[in-house]
Amino acid sequence: MMLFTCVLAAASDTMPLGNKMDEMPIAFFADKGFEFDVDDSMQHLYEKPTVEISIVIPEHFTHMNEKYNFDYITFSHAELNICLDDHPYNNKKRSIITISVDMANKSDVIFYFEKKINSVNTRTMFTLNLSKVLEYWEKKQKNLNSPVITKKPWPVKIEHLLFDGGDGSSMAQAVIIKNAKNEEDGVRAESRWISEVHPDWRKGKQATLIEKNGKHYDQIEYKAFDGMTKTVFFDITDFWGK
């Protein structure tokens, strides 16, 4: 994805006040539809290690049964607090920040969202430290193009559970769960496998049961930190009906 240089707009003397949330983990933002990318290909143009951080922002999201509508985004470092311009991407709002790695580790981005309470608009600030974005990106780079099956030797044994088969990317490559005591233990085993292999994934849709050629499979959707939906297939034949 091509990134463009960040343009910083001058802020007013006093920024609008709002309800401030505690700093949120990046998983919270990814779950709400935010997308993050980092480009370090232009470091040779700067004296210090420098990156371009791209943030795609949803128009709205729901949190604790309340709907929040995007208003604007600011960049905050020490006493500096400035609004960021919008660089639309695929009809979505996007902000891009060109920043040294050192400054990014000491800076926040603050997302201002509005919600209605008793017909009155109130503004809430959601804060994210840019160091979390860099950590997420570094982890993503390490895992890029690295199939799950190469990360661990198979089969894998965790306590009494045995995981065999493939990486779960298709029915043919389903993760085979063995030695589960019953169906409840087998369902927990699915979550245990995900937490071991993909600790940054969050469960999305409930499992879809599939029966094929005398075998039973769970098809489960997960949401990765980058907002992408991932599907994993588990072969549950061994504990089916226990």
Image (tube, helix red, strand yellow):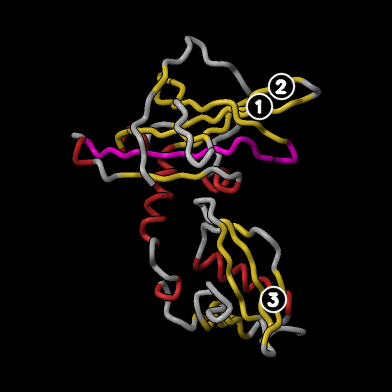
Helix, strand or loop at mark 2: strand
Place residue 105 in its image quadrant: top left
> Hey, which residue is sitting farthest right in the picture?
118
Q: Which residue is rendered at x = 42% and y = 70% of the image?
A: 147
Question: Residue drawn at (46%, 36%), measured in percent from left and top?
Answer: 129
Q: Amino acid at mark 3?
A: Asp
Mark 1 to mark 3 CA distance (whole Å) = 43 Å
Report the front residue among 106 and 18: 18
What residue is rendered at 79% in x and 22% in y?
A: 119
Give coordinates of residue 174: x percent, y percent: 56, 78
In this rendering, the answer to whether 164 lies above or below 99 is: below
Q: Residues within 10 Å of mark 3 (few under 14, many from 20)?
A: some
Q: Comparing marks 3 and 2, which lies closer to the viewer?
A: 2
Q: Magenta stretch: dominant SS?
A: strand
**Residue closest to the far bottom:** 214
Please report whichever mark, 1 or 2, sits nearer to the chain's N-terminal start.
Answer: 1
Q: Which mark is first along the chain, 3 or 1? A: 1
Residue 102 lies within the magenta run: no
Residue under pointer 3: 185
Q: On the image, numbered disc 1 is attached to which residue?
A: 114
Numbered disc 3: secondary structure:
helix
